[in-house]
Image: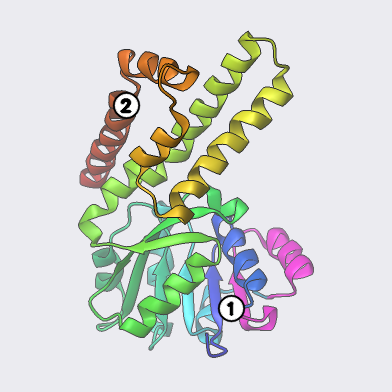
Amino acid sequence: MDNRKIGFIGTGKMGEALIRGIIAAKLALPSCIYASDMDYAKLELLEKEYKINICRDNCDVILGSDIIVIAVKPQTVPAVLEEIKDSIKKQLIVSIAAGVTIDTFESALPRGAKVVRVMPNIAATVRETASAISLGSAVSKEDAAAVSEIFNSIGRSVIIPEHLMDAVTGLSGSGPAYIFMIIEALADGGIHEGLDRNTAKLLAAQTVLGAAKMVLEGGTHTGELRDMVTSPGGTTIRGIRVMEERGVRVAMMNAVIAACERSKELGRKK
């Protein structure tokens, strides 16, 4: 990261997760990280735990940083942009405010401002987030690489056109909730057959984690992976038949599509 200084405006769950990930990955020293938040008591706790610099004023974060992460609630973004616009020079602005477009930032900030929009998900809190990155018109390849490096420190990231952000919302943004339901259902099946709650939950969660790692790290098509587990006339194919009969595959597809459509609706209301 060439010793660039990174600032955070907002230090909620996602902001703190990024700070923790950046420090753990040694992308920046704690002394090169600046943060502000309306909750100063929270900032003091972060200063104590991570040894970062804390600021009472958002503009102090801007002046001390090369990369600025805007990690506030979407409804707070206009006020923050109005406050910081005169302090923005050549800093790279990274927004993780859900639903706020790149155009909103570029329109409010000085002409030529470098803006990147990112949508991580809740798994940032355990450094396994799936993040989608969209680039503003003034962002360079070097800027894009820097942002990817930051978000890869807490999971994995992809770069996409901004018009696909609603699809990302439906898939990876809302997706953890779908997976939590699947884990709960798997565990309940185990409990039905005699396993205790804790054992069933552990087995279900580890099964999902292991399956996901095989998809991400093996390079094998998911159909081939499924065939590896599915013996002719065996237990797995019996279970798969029930899932297909009950429309599990279609239900999962439709959940993503419905969440995507809702994201578009919410965007039109703004």
Q: To which quarter of the image does residue 46 belong?
A: bottom right
Residue position marked by numbered label 1 in the rendering: 27
Residue shown at 70% from the left, 19% from the top: 197
Scheme of image coloration = rainbow
Q: Nearer the viewer, residue 47 or 29?
A: 29
Three-letter residue code for mark 1: Leu
**From the viewer's perspective, is the residue at label 1 or at label 2 nearer?**
2
**Residue at the front extreme of this rendering:** 232
Tell me: 234 left or right of 90.
right
Residue shown at 47% from the left, 50% from the top: 121
Q: Which residues are magenta?
A: 28-52
Badge 2 local density, few (<14 within 10 Å), some, or many (20+)? Answer: few
- Helix, strand or loop status at disc 2: helix
Tell me: 65 left or right of 112.
right
Residue 3 image point, x, y percent:
57, 89
Q: Residue 36: in sight, yes or no?
A: yes
Three-letter residue code for mark 2: Arg
Residue shown at 42% from the left, 16% from the top: 233
Q: Earlier in the sequence, mark 1 or mark 2?
A: 1
Q: Are marks 1 and 2 in contact (CB under 8 Å)?
A: no
Residue 104 image point, x, y percent:
27, 64
